[in-house]
Image (cartoon, grey):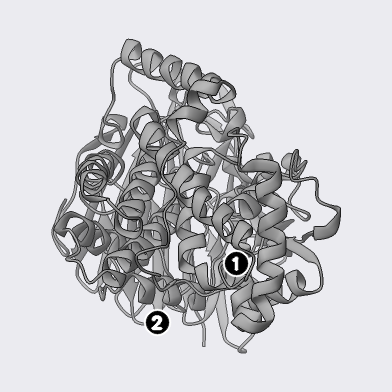
């Protein structure tokens, strides 16, 4: 990776975003996992996870993650709340749990324990926690199945139950207490068997993190710890780029990884054990990569399915990690560029899209950018495709993955990379070119992608120049004929600038310029050299999966066979 201030240039092929294995190896791994999961229904698997009952946990780790007090209060009045959805606890069928996947995972992982603890002390919260847990155990403790016993859910459930064991083990009912301790042991043995069979890098990390936590918190864990730490180190090496980003390029997944490793770190501290260097090193790289996607207000931009995450949540996650670091300026593997100038921050997606198998909620966002000044987000992406819930139905989530939902150039209302079901991506961008350098009183980023080459014969090139005082951003978007593919005679293209919240908009009569008045009374002036400005409805999605209406500036043009260049400027007016 180029150091801050140095030039990064050349072709960034999708190979940079991959560490592929052979197709036959992948197929064999998937078949092995499928057969193993089928065995969960047999007495054989029950024998695998049955064994000695631990008398107690060796330690209770501190949960470093803050709970959601509002969701905790909902639990106290008998409801689970998740992204705008509500479920009566006394009406839940834990045997089936017919809820959206994210909501079901929230329950199966026992994330609600953290929220309950944020709103109730041990005396008030323990009886309720015990009641919910007992009902869950009746339905699931002796029936390993998806999704309750999926690797990531098992790992998180073990860790969350360990962190909040005082809430779960306060009961004087010895039979209930034995069920809890037995579930710890059975989950640990299940992870022993499952982690090694995981086919996805993030699942491997979760599995081995769970094994390692179990080795620290349950008796006779020496051999398990050796196996767990070895597996975790290999899995992290496969998942995490040298610059700290993750294969999926998803901030949501990176945040979960930081949360997982930070909580595992607390397991070592609870036992007064040395934390492995590879774990500390990984967190030390993750945090700068995550902060590299924050705006000047400290909140996270919207990339690869994430919403606009608040500064408070990011600050809490960084504090949980124990890492102090500056935001990363540029990450060639992670694929994002960050320019900080005065009160302005420019964020650019300048990397290949994640590989189909690694995409979490893959978005066709190549060369999209976000721009903010102080606390005001001026140009944003819609975001939120990974936050399906009461306010983001699946149909809207698919729309939020499109190129048109991002602040970039869209050719013929098509996507620069094809969107597939399950959050995966198909054919499209294969190569991304990037050149970044500091010039006199400005930073210059020039990038390009070939996502429209096969279908339309064009390469999209984008030049962004941010003045060193942050008060002017100049851009050029160019469609160039590709040297290998035939160019269509003419094609429609639209340059989209999705606006942040609370911006008043006035478009000039000639539709070549617009005035943007911010909530604080300041003004910005936008002008385009080619085409005319239209105003369309848009939205941006917050971290809770709530869409907020806004607008977008759309510059429509017709690209001739020889290509074209659209110049534009966004300037602070005072």
Residue 518 appears anywhere in the view: no
Q: Position of residue 316 (x, y in %)?
A: 44, 76
Which type of secondary structure does the marked residue at label 1 adopt?
helix
Q: Position of residue 527 (x, y in %)?
A: 54, 64
Q: Is residue 196 shown left or right of residue 530?
A: left
C-alpha distance separating marks 2 and 1: 39 Å
* Residue drawn 42% across the image and 34% down it: 358
Badge count: 2
Name the residue tied to disc 1: 113
Residue 443 drawn above or below residue 412: below
Q: Position of residue 369 (x, y in %)?
A: 46, 56
- Residue 23 occupies quadrant: top left
Along the viewing direction, whichever of 18 and 69 lies nearer the viewer: 69
Along the viewing direction, whichever of 300 and 433 lies nearer the viewer: 300
* Residue drawn 41% across the image and 33% down it: 194
Residue 12 appears anywhere in the view: yes
Residues at discs 2 and 1 in contact (Cβ within 8 Å)? no
Residue found at the far top of this picture? 24
- Residue 275 occupies quadrant: bottom left
Residue 363 drawn above or below residue 107: above
Along the viewing direction, whichever of 44 and 485 lies nearer the viewer: 44
Residue 343: mark in rendering: 2
Along the viewing direction, whichever of 9 and 166 lies nearer the viewer: 166
* Residue drawn 74% across the image and 45% down it: 94
């Amino acid at each position: 990776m180029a150091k801050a201030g140095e030039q990064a240039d050349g072709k960034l092929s999708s190979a940079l975003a991959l560490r592929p294995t052979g197709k036959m190896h992948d197929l064999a791994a998937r078949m092995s996992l499928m057969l193993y999961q089928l065995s969960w229904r047999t007495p054989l698997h029950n024998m695998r996870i049955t064994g000695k009952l631990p008398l107690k946990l060796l330690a209770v780790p501190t949960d470093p993650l803050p709970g959601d007090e509002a969701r905790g209060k909902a639990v106290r009045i008998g409801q689970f709340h998740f992204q705008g959805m509500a479920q009566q606890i006394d009406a839940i069928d834990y045997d089936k749990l017919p809820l959206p996947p994210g909501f079901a995972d929230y329950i199966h992982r026992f994330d609600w324990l953290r929220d309950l603890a944020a709103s109730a002390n041990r005396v008030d919260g323990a009886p309720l926690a015990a009641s919910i847990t007992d009902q869950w155990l009746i339905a699931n403790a002796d029936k390993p199945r998806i999704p309750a016993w999926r690797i990531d859910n098992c790992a998180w459930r073990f860790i969350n139950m360990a962190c909040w064991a005082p809430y779960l083990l306060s009961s004087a009912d010895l039979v209930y207490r034995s069920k809890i301790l037995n579930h710890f042991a059975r989950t640990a043995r299940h992870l022993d068997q499952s982690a090694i069979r995981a086919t996805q890098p993030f699942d491997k990390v979760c599995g081995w993190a769970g094994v390692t936590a179990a080795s620290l918190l349950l008796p006779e864990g020496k051999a398990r710890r050796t196996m767990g730490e070895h597996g975790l180190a290999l899995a992290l090496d496969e998942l995490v780029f040298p610059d700290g980003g993750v294969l999926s390029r998803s901030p949501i997944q990176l945040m979960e990884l930081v949360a997982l490793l930070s909580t595992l770190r607390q397991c070592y501290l609870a036992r007064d054990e040395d934390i492995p260097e590879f774990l500390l090193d990984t967190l030390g790289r993750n945090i700068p990569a995550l902060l590299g996607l924050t705006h000047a207000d400290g909140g996270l931009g919207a990339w690869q399915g994430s919403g606009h995450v608040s500064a408070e949540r990011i600050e809490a996650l960084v504090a949980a990690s124990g890492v102090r670091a500056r935001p990363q300026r540029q990450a060639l593997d992670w694929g994002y560029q960050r320019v900080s100038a005065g009160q302005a921050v420019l964020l650019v997606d300048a990397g290949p899209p994640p590989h189909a198998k690694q995409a979490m909620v893959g978005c066709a966002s190549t060369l999209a950018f976000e721009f903010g000044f102080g606390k005001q987000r001026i140009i944003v992406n819609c975001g939120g495709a990974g936050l399906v819930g009461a306010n983001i139905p699946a149909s809207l989530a698919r729309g939020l993955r499109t190129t048109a939902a991002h602040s970039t150039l869209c050719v013929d209302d098509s996507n620069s990379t094809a969107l597939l079901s399950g959050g995966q991506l198909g054919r499209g961008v294969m190569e991304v070119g990037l050149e970044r350098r500091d010039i006199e009183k400005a930073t210059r980023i020039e990038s390009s992608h070939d996502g429209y080459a096969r279908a339309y014969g064009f390469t999209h090139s984008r030049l962004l120049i941010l003045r060193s005082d942050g008060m002017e951003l100049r851009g050029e978007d160019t469609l160039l004929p590709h040297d290998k593919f035939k160019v269509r005679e003419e094609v429609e293209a639209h340059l989209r600038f999705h606006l942040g919240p609370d911006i008043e908009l006035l478009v000039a009569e000639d539709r070549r310029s617009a005035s943007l008045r911010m909530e604080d009374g300041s003004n910005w002036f936008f002008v385009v050299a080619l085409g005319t400005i239209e105003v369309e409805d848009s939205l941006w999605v917050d971290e809770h999966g709530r869409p907020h209406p806004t607008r977008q500036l759309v510059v429509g043009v017709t690209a001739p066979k020889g290509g074209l260049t659209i110049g534009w400027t966004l300037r602070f007016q005072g």
